[in-house]
Amino acid sequence: MDEAADQPQTKGKRKPPGRSQERRIWDESGSRCQFCGAAGIAGLQIHHLDENPANTIDSNLLAICGGCHERYKHGVISRNEAFRVKYYLTEGKPPFPLIAAPAPQSRKTTIKVEVNKGQVADKIVNNHYGQKGAPIILPGTVAEDADRYNYLEYLMERLAEFRGAGASFGQKRQGKIHVGVIRSMVKNDWGALPKNLKLGVWQSVVDDLKAKIRNTALGRVRTSQGKGCYHSFEEHVSKGSAE
């Protein structure tokens, strides 16, 4: 994987999102901050995940309250956590429950059209608004097995953590490594996002991620010291059950 992908993008000129785009981002978060649970769009701001204010595509934007935005700027909320929240929102698994939106209604707009000697006719246009459906889970994929899906997430976060520690061992890698980069790497290597991987390749992906973790600078040091770099699938499942 190209190490340049791990670095924050070069910041460009600020390009504010439009009103309709802001509404989409607010709707995605359920009109609340998904870091602290604060409700109400009046206090929400738009955060750029890659910290490039010129990149205003929906996948790079996240609703966040002013307080949490400040905590992010001061490092209290990590970049990895911001990407994780965005991922869970796109998967329909928000950290905090979404505030129920009002039922779809028809909106009537009256358009006045002048015809025949100044007479006025009213034309009524009905606009219907629907709601988003439930997340799609493909049959036979990792998304059907919560334990295997969560273990993949754990290994990807572990790899991001170990690669991020590379600077401590003299590596030239710059910038924070976020789990979104690792998730994209898995997609490039295996042809699908982790949740959409076939259950039949799950073990191979797990073995690949473990090898990459052991091959980091931190992984090599821990291995030479006889220390583990990750816990097993069984340990992970047992830990989750205990919690």
Image: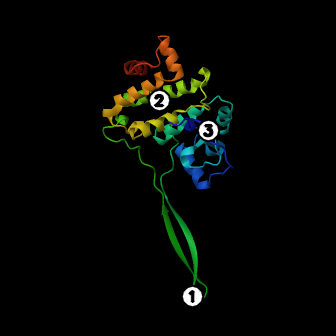
Above or below residue 107? Residue 221 is: above
Q: Which mark is residue 116?
A: 1
Q: Could you tell me which secondary element the residue under label 3 belongs to?
A: loop
The one nearer the camera, 148 or 241, is 148
Tell me the quarter of the image containing the C terminus: top left
Q: Can residue 34 be seen in this view?
A: no
The one nearer the camera, 80 or 9, is 9
Q: How crowded is mark 2: few (under 14 residues within 10 Å), some or many (20 or more)?
A: many
In which image quadrant can residue 195 be found? top left
Q: How crowded is mark 3: few (under 14 residues within 10 Å), some or many (20 or more)?
A: some
Image x and y of residue 56, in percent: 60, 49
- Image color mode: rainbow
Q: Which mark is residue 8?
A: 3
Measure the alpha-carbon separation of dots 1 and 3: 62 Å
Q: Name the residue under label 2.
A: 156
Q: Residue at x 49, y 27 (%)?
A: 159
Instruction: Count every numbered label the image shows and give the total.
Output: 3
Above or below residue 70? Residue 236 is: above
Measure the alpha-carbon separation of dots 2 and 3: 19 Å
Please tell me whether mark 1 or mark 3 is closer to you in this view.
Answer: 3
Q: Residue at x 41, y 43 (%)?
A: 135
- Kind of residue at disc 2: Met
